[in-house]
Image: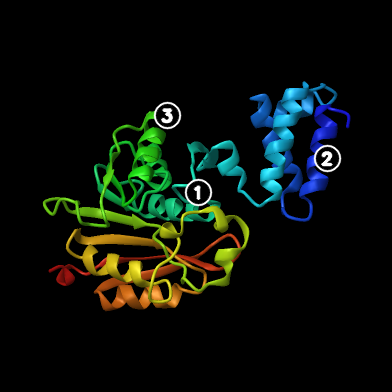
Amino acid sequence: MILSIEHLIEHGRAQLDSCSDSAKLDAQLLLCFVLEKERSYLLTWPDKILSQAQSSQYLELLARRINGEPIAYIVGVKEFWSLPFFVSPATLIPRPDTEILIELVLTHYGEKQNLNCLDLGTGTGAIALALASELPSWHIDAIDFSFDAVALAKRNAKALALSQVNIYQSDWFSKVSQSTSFEIIVSNPPYIDGNDENLSVGDVRFEPKSALVANEQGLGDIADITAKAVNYLAPNGALFFEHGFEQGKAVRNILRTAGFNDIETVKDLNGHDRITWGKLSITSKI
């Protein structure tokens, strides 16, 4: 095999065509990782010959991708909200659909100063840190049940110079101070039913099941968070959920039953229900 950048990319694309919807991009990202260069470098120097060691490393990474391992776990980084996030198998990989939640919060609350915001199940810290990058006056807490996830989110906060976000371990609200009320609570909780056949295909095979699976047909954690959130939200405080594409109606019902008003479901980039949010009625707080 000719070991030029151009030929290695084409070889990778051909190998990945049957198992990836972004075969050429995957090949390019793996090669960028090996060379420690940006994609523009690949386009500028297509005829550059790689060393045998570089080529071997690339082919090893390519084999992992052919086996289905997500690119983000292989290279250890994933972009979200135009920010680079370290990722690991301890957390979910940030996805573009989650950016819709960020957009909604900014649209409805972006002009307000000094709000208290809580991110439940922060994972990599993507939601909390993206909001912090846009809203430096906000006081943001970010929690996760997993100590490994907390450590990773703190690493991302430091790398992004967003250390003002308060990141700590908690099983949902168990360690959240009851003396603090939040104007905004956001969450991308587990919402997949344990029997869902999609758990055995694609990238999710490699992601932590604890961050994916919930009981009660995937709605258990959403219902639990909603029931407890009424004790932590300020009057007219808002609760935002990311959820499964068939769960919009069920999540709206959960919020409505708990005393939320102005409930809205927003669709994702593919036209599926993805984010549902509502405001807590003043009379609903216990």
At 74% from the left and 36% from the top, the residue drawn is: 59
Judge depth for marks 2 and 1 and give the one in front: 2
Q: Nearer the viewer, residue 261 or 75?
A: 75
| Amino acid type at image mark 2 | His
Judge depth for marks 2 and 3 and give the one in front: 2
Tag count: 3
**Label located before the other in sequence (2 or 3):** 2
Q: Quadrant of residue 249?
A: bottom left
Q: Quadrant of the N terminus?
A: top right
Q: Residue 47, image x and y in percent? A: 85, 24
Per the image, the residue denoted by label 3 is 159
Q: Nearer the viewer, residue 213 or 229?
A: 213
Kindly report the distance in space between the C-alpha atoms of the residues bearing marks 2 and 3.
Answer: 34 Å
| Amino acid type at image mark 3 | Ala
Per the image, the residue denoted by label 2 is 11
**Label located before the other in sequence (1 or 3):** 1
Query: In the image, is residue 280 above or below residue 91?
Result: below
At numbered mark 1, what does the secondary structure look like: helix, strand or loop?
A: loop
Q: Is residue 186 left or right of residue 71?
A: left
At 37% from the left and 55% from the top, the residue drawn is: 108
Q: Residues within 10 Å of mark 3 (few under 14, many from 20)?
A: few
Q: Nearer the viewer, residue 148 or 31?
A: 148
At 49% from the left and 46% from the top, the residue drawn is: 89
At numbered mark 2, what does the secondary structure look like: helix, strand or loop?
A: helix
Q: Quadrant of residue 265?
A: bottom left
| Amino acid type at image mark 1 | Pro
At numbered mark 3, what does the secondary structure look like: helix, strand or loop?
A: helix
Q: Is residue 181 left or right of residue 199?
A: left
| Disc 2 + disc 3, Cβ < 8 Å | no
Q: Nearer the viewer, residue 107 or 232?
A: 232
Per the image, the residue denoted by label 1 is 94
Kindly report the distance in space between the C-alpha atoms of the residues bearing marks 1 and 3.
Answer: 17 Å
